[in-house]
Structures are given as structure tokens and as C-alpha cells.
Amino acid sequence: MSESAEIIVVGGGLFGPAIAYGLARRGCDVALLDDGDDVLRAARGNFGLVWVQSKGMGMQRYQDWSRESAELYPDFAAELKELTGIDVIYRRGGLQLLLGDEEVEAKQAEIDRMKAQAGDRDFACEIIPRDEAQQMVPELRFGNRVTGAGYCRYDGDVNPLKLLRALLAGFQAAGGRYRSAARVETIRHDGAAFVAKTQQGRFTAPKIVLAAGHGITRLAPMVGLYVPIRPQRGQVLVTERAEVRLPIPLATVRQTDEGSVQLGNSEEDVDFDDGTTLDVTRRIAARTISLFPALAALRLVRSWGCIRVLTPDKCAIYDESEEFPGAYVATSHSGVTLAAVNARQVAPWISDRETPPGFDHFSAKRFGRGEDDVQAA
């Protein structure tokens, strides 16, 4: 089989479908190539947060970018629902509960650094006292150790599985072609177009976007791109469905629209091991009970490990190949948070070179490139 398109997007997680959706909505002929169901797919194992308050330390453009996406989300979610009938259950508002004075002091120091970095921009994050935070979560009492909370009015959450489904459905409704079980084995440029050889045949297009998470590491050198990313595991626990309602998400506790409560998370450097461990499970459960003692009565029904895609500074990479213009990369661990801005602003960058202000900050050039990297490429 052989197919041609204007643009090939490689990767069926959240980054790829969000960009492909935005491109298709702009009238582009797009082929979205996805791998099989046995790959490490953070889009199906994440926490579902649209989170701003902790993003961009060391890179103000990434803080701004995350906030821009959060500001787009209400209209973005409504657009997806109108087009596909799928409600992604977007909610705005979020808390990071703090245990003890040390956590309050550490969070305040983080906020102070972020405000200094932001300059005259409104950072929009603050520490609120325990009583004020408790008013936002009236049905579930805090534990005695909760002393306050980080609050950002731009934070929120969605149902990530419904978001992925809506993006794929919206992409296809806009005329996009989705090809599953189409793992890209090789990419080459034949002088006129990029040729992607897959398990389903050959796909050719003048432009190609690599948005395949950890699969980018293997593919990027084929089109002259340098993309330093590494894996990090996060574990999540899920309880039975609960009658109590959490009206807004917390950084480590959120209730799904089905009623179960998700508990997380962890940050573990264990290569690509997506298993679970008892010591981390215990730690997550113990902290959750410190935040909300009443949750101790709920039964845990499952847990999983998920592999994040992290860049060296934990900020996104968006780049175009200098060796092969028309080859792009887009990656970050924040696929949920950035879905709206990927659809609305990254798509025009790829289709019509409408470059967002300050977009050069996201180039992988910021990391330099050592001799070993050049030899490996």
C-alpha cells in the first residue's frame, strides 16, 4: 500500500492527534500514523491535569505557553463537543495541598522565583490559607497536617481518555486519515518529499511531524533532528467509585467523572520499566490519607505505571530540521495541558509557517550538542 498526503504526523498519543486535528481543521490533507497498542502510551495512563502553576521554571516562555493553552481550553473543549459529541469534562481551578510549614516555605520560594522570572507578567499563582482551600472542597475534610495550598486559577483537568477519543474523532471528522498499527520503521527524503516506511506500507508527504513520544529518539536522526529526551515513571492508584465529590482537581488527587478517585504520583528514573512497586504505592496512599483521612475507607481497585517523556529542563521541544526543512518535532510530558495550544498555534506553524512569538525558545539548540550526540546521529 502507498499513500500520499500534504503532511504526515507520526504518533497517536496526545501531541500527535492534537496537532493533526488542528491541521485538518485548517483544511490540510493529513495522515496520522499510530503504532500498536503495546507501546508505552502516556496518553492512556496520565493524570489528566491541565496544569500551569508548576510549569516553566527556568524558561518563562514555557510558563506562558502552558497558560496560553489553559486559557484556550474552555473554547477548545466546547469545540470538540460540538464537532464530535464527546464531552472531555473540562474543569477549571486546582490546588496543591501542602503538609506542614516546610512545604509551605518551599512552595512560597518556588512562587517567588517564578514571579521574579515572570517580571511584569501576572504569574497567577499564590498560597492560600487552609480555611480558604477547604471552602473549595466542602465535602471532604482536610487532615490536621494540611497547612495551606498552592492555587492557580488557570489550573484544571479533563478526562484524558475522552480527550484522546475526541481529538481522533474530530481529526477524522475534519477529513484526516488515521492509520493504526502503522509503526514507522524508516524515514527518508527522496528529494521531493519525505517517505515513511511503515508496517502498513509507504506514506509520502512534503512535510512530516514527529510527535511519537519516546519513538522520536529513534526517528529524529533520520531527518536531521536532535531531540534529547529521557523516560521517567509515574505511578497512579485508583479507588472504587466514591459518593463524595471533589469539585476541583488537586495536584495528587483527582476524582474522575465516573466517581473513582485517582491518587498519584511518583517521579522515578527506572528507564522504561512501567511496572508498579509496593513502596511507592504505600507512599502515595499514606500522603493521600494525610490530605484526606476519609479516603482511607475506600478500596483500591487498580494501579499502573506510566512512562513520561522528559526533556533535560522539563520544558517542551518544538523544532524544524535545518538539514531537511519540512521535518518537525513536537514533544513534552504535558500532552494534556498543551493539547489546546498544539491544535490552535502549532498547527499554523507547520501548515503556514505562522510562528508564535518567542517560539525559538523551544528549539533543542538550547541544550547544545556534544560530540557523542553528533556521532550517534
Image (cartoon, rainbow, N blue to C red):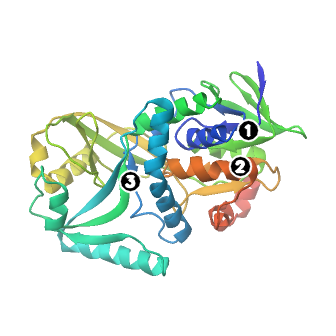
Q: Amino acid at mark 2?
A: Ile
Q: Which residue bears the numbered disc 3? A: 267
Q: Which residue bears the numbered disc 1? A: 7
Residue that appears at 76% across and 53% down: 321
In the rendered image, the vertical position of residue 338 relative to residue 153, given as above or below:
above
* Labels 2 and 3 touching (C-beta < 8 A): no
Coordinates of residue 268 in the picture (x, y in percent): 40, 52
Q: Amino acid at mark 3?
A: Glu
Q: Nearer the viewer, residue 74 or 15?
A: 74
Coordinates of residue 85 in the picture (x, y in percent): 44, 30
**Horizontal relation, residue 98 to residue 10: left or right:** left
Coordinates of residue 131 in the picture (x, y in percent): 13, 66
Residue 337 appears in view: no
Q: Amino acid at mark 1?
A: Ile
Dot 3: what SS?
Answer: loop
**Horizontal relation, residue 135 to residue 73: left or right:** left
Residue 8 appears in view: yes
Residue that appears at 52% across and 41% down: 14
Dot 1: what SS?
Answer: strand
Callout 1 crowding tier (Cα within 10 Å): few <14, some 14–19, many ≥20:
many
Q: Nearer the viewer, residue 115 or 106?
A: 115
Q: Which residue bears the numbered disc 2? A: 350
Coordinates of residue 241 in the picture (x, y in percent): 19, 33
Q: Quadrant of residue 172?
A: top right
In the rendered image, the vertical position of residue 354 relative to residue 179, given as above or below:
below
Whole-angstrom CA distance, mark 1 to mark 2, is: 9 Å
* Labels 1 and 2 touching (C-beta < 8 A): yes
